[in-house]
Image (tube, rainbow, N blue to C red):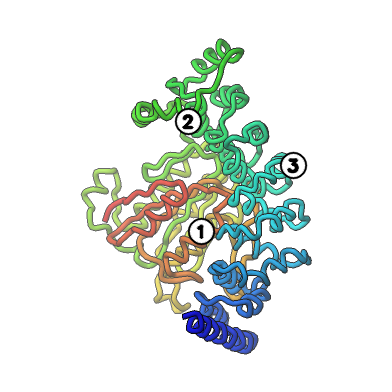
């Protein structure tokens, strides 16, 4: 039996070595971008030291989706012995992009053999290495890293890394509140909503008496998406059944703070059912609506609209009576969207920043970056929206009227991609642009049919990769007669609401 097992193992190893040789030969010569990606994925499900060695150089390939494919294939390695070439790269510490990609894979797959080597990169000069080292330490609950990650949250210049630090402290902070809670409390004042909102939510797990005072003050002053999260966090920390009235909480805290003791998790567990019912029936009243689109309201002050203008948007809706009852007088899908979008833009507050993108086979932007919703910008945006037309494939300029959902979503996230190089130009994972939107409204009337990614599962994963730390809320809307599971999944995975506007 042992001899038979060894023979099978040797056969698989030989096959893997042969595949590695073939890959090295053909990948080097291949010029077609799509085929290069396919060659990488041909190794999926195979693992050996030799396959690891031929894929490591691909992690820094100029073609970003080939590099991403190599990371995904390597992420499937189950045997720590076959991962040794990857661990050696990390331990050697040479300055190249391979280390960040390997730490990314190790973090996603929670490779415990990388725990200590990864922790050494928390102080790396390379921000991408710091990012994935923080994420790795959090995912593996490397408690020796808590103090270092607390320092990163307090001082790292990159907002995305600070957001990752919040997530890591949330993962490790239970029973370590004395170290993890103070930097989370300080992060409530972070200028980036991806950080301050995440810190507020994290304090529901890393519960601390020290957080109550600052949160009570924020209940009266918080703006944007942060205002939505303060009251639920106070309830989670204290188990108090107060509503979201700031004065009520302030009066209570002034009386209670000297002798107050947090209820234990066991005590909270006993009243969880009652609390869930109460919270489900209560809706906070102090969150100002800063914007809305097709009935979805938001308190965000950083909003982006992404609108489908593919050829099918020229079709009339089937349920005209339903739309007529809502006040619409024209019934092509784009007519309805243009009218409602103009109203949404006109109602934005002066302190909101916003942008609008349309997409068909390509993406078209009103502005390169979000701008303030002052009177001039709103008039300009509404004029731009009024001129939007469904794009037809009969223009003589090639296929213009298809549906590039991937391109539209990436534009909404602030990511620009060079389709020829198949690489990110601006707005990558580490982009923490101060004016980046934190809430997106994404509307479509059909399944993806164009763009670098068409398979909805691939698009969902790509959005998850980019939005992992930014936490942009993505509200999705469908119009027309098509299966909208993709849009529903996108909203659910990204903290948003899905609305089916009708057929």
Instruction: Report x, y in % for residue 102.
Output: 65, 65
Q: Nearer the viewer, residue 80 or 36?
A: 80
Query: Can see residue 382?
Result: no
Q: Quadrant of residue 455?
A: bottom left
**Pointers 2 and 3 in contact (C-beta within 8 Å):** no
Q: Nearer the viewer, residue 418 or 326?
A: 418
**Pointers 3 and 1 in contact (C-beta within 8 Å):** no
Instruction: Report x, y in % for residue 201.
Output: 53, 37
Q: Nearer the viewer, mark 3 or mark 1?
A: 3
- Residue at point 63%, 80% (across, down): 50
Q: Quadrant of residue 49?
A: bottom right
Which residue is under mark 2? 232
Which residue is under mark 3? 155
| Badge 2 or badge 3: first in the primary sequence | 3
Which residue is under mark 1? 463
Q: CA distance from mark 2 to mark 3?
A: 27 Å
Query: Can see residue 470?
Result: yes
| Badge 3 or badge 1: first in the primary sequence | 3
Q: Nearer the viewer, residue 102 or 312?
A: 102
Instruction: Report x, y in % for residue 306.
Output: 47, 55
- Which residue ends up furthest to the top in the rendered image? 255
Up-down: is 3 above or below 224? below
Q: Secondary structure at mark 3?
A: helix
Q: Secondary structure at mark 1?
A: helix
- Near mark 2 (Cα within 10 A), the count class, few <14, some 14-19 or many ≥20, is some
Q: Nearer the viewer, residue 499 or 171?
A: 171
| Badge 1 or badge 2: first in the primary sequence | 2
| 227 sits to left or right of 334 | right
- Residue at point 44%, 20% (across, down): 242
């Amino acid at each position: 039996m042992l001899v038979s097992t060894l023979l099978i193992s040797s056969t698989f190893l030989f096959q893997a070595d042969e595949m590695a040789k073939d890959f090295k030969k053909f990948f080097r010569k291949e010029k077609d971008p799509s085929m290069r990606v396919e060659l990488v994925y041909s190794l999926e499900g195979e693992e050996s030291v030799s396959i690891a060695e031929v894929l490591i150089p691909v992690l820094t390939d100029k073609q970003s989706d080939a590099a991403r494919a190599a990371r995904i294939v390597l992420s499937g390695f189950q045997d720590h012995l076959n991962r040794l070439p990857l661990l050696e790269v990390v331990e050697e510490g040479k300055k190249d992009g391979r280390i960040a990609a390997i730490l990314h894979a190790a973090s996603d797959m929670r490779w415990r053999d990388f725990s200590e080597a990864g922790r050494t990169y928390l102080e790396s000069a390379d921000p991408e290495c710091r990012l994935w080292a923080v994420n790795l330490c959090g995912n593996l609950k490397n408690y020796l890293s808590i103090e270092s990650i607390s320092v990163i949250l307090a001082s790292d210049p990159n907002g995305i890394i600070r957001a990752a630090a919040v997530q890591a402290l949330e993962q490790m902070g239970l029973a370590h509140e004395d170290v993890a809670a103070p930097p989370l409390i300080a992060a409530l004042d972070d200028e980036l909503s991806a950080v301050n909102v995440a810190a507020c939510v994290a304090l529901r797990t890393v519960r601390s008496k020290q957080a109550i005072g600052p949160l009570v003050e924020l209940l009266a002053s918080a703006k944007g998406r942060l205002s939505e999260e303060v009251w639920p966090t106070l309830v989670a920390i204290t188990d108090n059944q107060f509503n979201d009235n700031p004065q009520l909480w302030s009066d209570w805290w002034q009386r209670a703070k000297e002798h107050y003791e947090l209820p234990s998790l066991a005590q909270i567990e006993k009243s969880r059912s009652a609390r869930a019912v109460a919270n489900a029936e209560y809706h906070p009243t102090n969150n100002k609506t800063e914007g809305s689109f097709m009935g979805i309201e938001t308190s965000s002050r950083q909003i982006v609209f992404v609108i489908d203008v593919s050829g099918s948007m020229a079709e009339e809706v089937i349920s005209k009576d339903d739309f007529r009852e809502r006040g619409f007088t024209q019934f092509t899908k784009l007519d309805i969207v243009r009218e409602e979008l103009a109203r949404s833009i006109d109602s934005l507050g002066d302190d909101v920043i916003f942008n609008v993108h349309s997409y068909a086979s390509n993406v078209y932007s009103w502005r390169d970056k979000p701008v303030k919703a002052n009177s001039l910008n709103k008039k300009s945006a509404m004029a731009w929206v009024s001129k939007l037309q469904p794009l037809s494939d009969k223009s003589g300029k090639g296929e213009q009227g298809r549906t590039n959902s991937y391109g539209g979503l990436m534009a909404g996230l602030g990511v620009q991609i060079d389709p020829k190089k198949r690489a990110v130009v601006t707005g990558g994972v580490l982009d923490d642009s101060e004016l980046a939107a934190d809430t997106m409204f994404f509307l479509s009337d059909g399944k993806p049919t164009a763009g670098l990614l068409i398979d909805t599962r691939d698009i969902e994963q790509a959005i998850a990769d980019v939005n992992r730390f930014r936490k942009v809320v993505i509200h999705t809307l469908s119009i027309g007669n098509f299966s909208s599971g993709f849009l529903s999944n996108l909203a659910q995975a990204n903290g948003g609401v899905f609305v089916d506007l009708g057929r």
